[in-house]
Image (cartoon, helix red, strand yellow):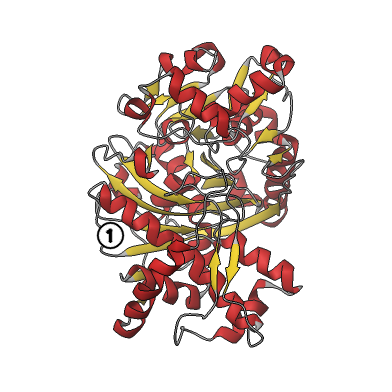
Amino acid sequence: MYLGIDLGTSAVKTVLVDASQRVIASESRPLATASPQSGYSEQDPAQWIDATFATLDALKTTHPGALAAVEGIGLSGQMHGATLLDASLRPLRPCILWNDGRSAAECRMLEQRWPALRAITGNKAMPGFTAPKLLWIAAHEPEIFAATKLVLLPKAYLRLVLSGEAVEDVSDASGSLWLDAARRDWSDAALAATGLSRDHMPRLVEGCAPATTLRGELAQRWGMTRRPVIAGGAGDNPAGAVGIGAIRPGTAFVSLGTSGALLAPTDSIAANPDRVVHTFCHAVPGMWIQAGAILSAASCLAWAARLFGITEAELLSPLGSRPQAPSPVSFLPYLAGERTPHDDPFVRGMLDGLSHGTDRGTIVQAVLEGVAFALADCRDALADAGIAIAEADVIGGGSRSGFWLAVLANVLNVPIHRFAGGETGAAFGAARLGRLAVTGEAVAAVCTRPQRIETFEPDAGLTDAYAERLPAWRELYRPRH
């Protein structure tokens, strides 16, 4: 048996997977995010631990025999968060999350200090990444910076609590701006540019490699017969790729979680930082992932549900199975700023084209289309790096909406494929990495592609209509700085 634990932004999801790669049980617990100022986004690391332990305690109650047989654990996590620990390995402050926009000035400072940043990391300095957050801490909370002895990404902090060891995988680490992406190792020059050294960093491993083992007292708490191996694991999107077998070139996929992304595995780096294409090491050796990323995807639908005071399912059900025409209303999904292609933490969302005849369904469709148009920006940025998208699988909570996937197929003008259980892709991928760390099997033998249950084909009439709308939608963007 294998466990996959996905430390997301809105929830911790844990799945139990058997030797036949069947998910036999899953548990989820919500997480809360604080925004002490506009553009700020933080979480208390203690709630990650409470939520994770709650999922495992629940699995012990419902599936004690299966949990007892767990041999390997894989971790997946929200990327880029800065978890700062003191000499006693206690958090010094709330974690600054991936969608926090406070460090824009520090990004400019970092690129000035280290002109080789884009060439070495494959990325542009943006507020979402971890390194600029540390420069902000040094400038605005110097006593916290001085007390910082260890900097961990969210899932590495979870692993520290589970195992007592500070270890990170190269996929998550490559979202920090401290990793040499080609060498898959910390860059001393990058660390020095933020006043840090390797002493502040966890040990690095590949995602499918064994990293450590579960603490004995925790194995006993959950009734496990042995101390399971904990794998290196992966950032959430690389873990999602492992979950759907996207481990080689030509297997592009869309992630429709709290944030969104269009991702393409590659066997060499195809960086395009000037167009805000992200370069990450994959969770499997010798592979990388190129990605266009948007800061708000399914969270836009959650925002609309709060606005109208009903559930997301109630928002979606009147729309039917597919669009008949583009909505007359346009929506910019920049509720928390944007990454690809704008790198603009200050821009905000917009509804354009409202009239007396605008109803709820028109607005909801516009929200879904706005996210799809933002992913079209990602598609074009990847194309500029030489990566053409011919079809795409989809993972994340947004994959449950057939209407949204039909919109996406027509906006991107490619077939979009859905899997059973696609919304748990990252946790399932993490479980696969936990298995690989135990068995040493060939990656391709374990990371197979699950069966597609539905394909959404583009409709020529709709693709033309959306293509006509896209330039006008792009004209709505106005930088605010």
Q: Is residue 46 above or below residue 391?
A: above
Tally the marks. Answer: 1
The C terminus appears in which quarter of the rendering?
top right
> Which quadrant of the structure image shows residue 63?
bottom right
Q: Is residue 55 above or below residue 464?
A: above
Observer-nearest residue: 241 or 428?
241
The residue where tag 1 is placed is: 389
Tag 1 secondary structure: loop
The residue sitting at 35% across, 36% down in the picture is 440
Q: Position of residue 356 (x, y in %)?
A: 67, 86
Q: Is residue 344 above or below residue 165?
A: below
In this image, 386 relative to 357: left or right?
left
Q: Which amino acid lies under the numbered mark 1 shown in the image of this protein?
A: Ile
Residue 86 seen from this side: no
Observer-nearest residue: 393 or 343?
343
Observer-nearest residue: 447 or 155?
155
The residue sitting at 70% across, 39% down in the picture is 42
In this image, 481 relative to 382: left or right?
right
Residue count near mark 1 (Cα–Cα under 10 Å), binned few <14, some 14–19, many ≥20: many
Q: Position of residue 242 (x, y in %)?
A: 39, 49
Q: Position of residue 199 (x, y in %)?
A: 53, 11
Residue 351 seen from this side: yes
Q: Position of residue 219 (x, y in %)?
A: 65, 35
The residue sitting at 73% across, 74% down in the picture is 308
Observer-nearest residue: 21 or 383?
383
The residue sitting at 74% across, 28% down in the picture is 93
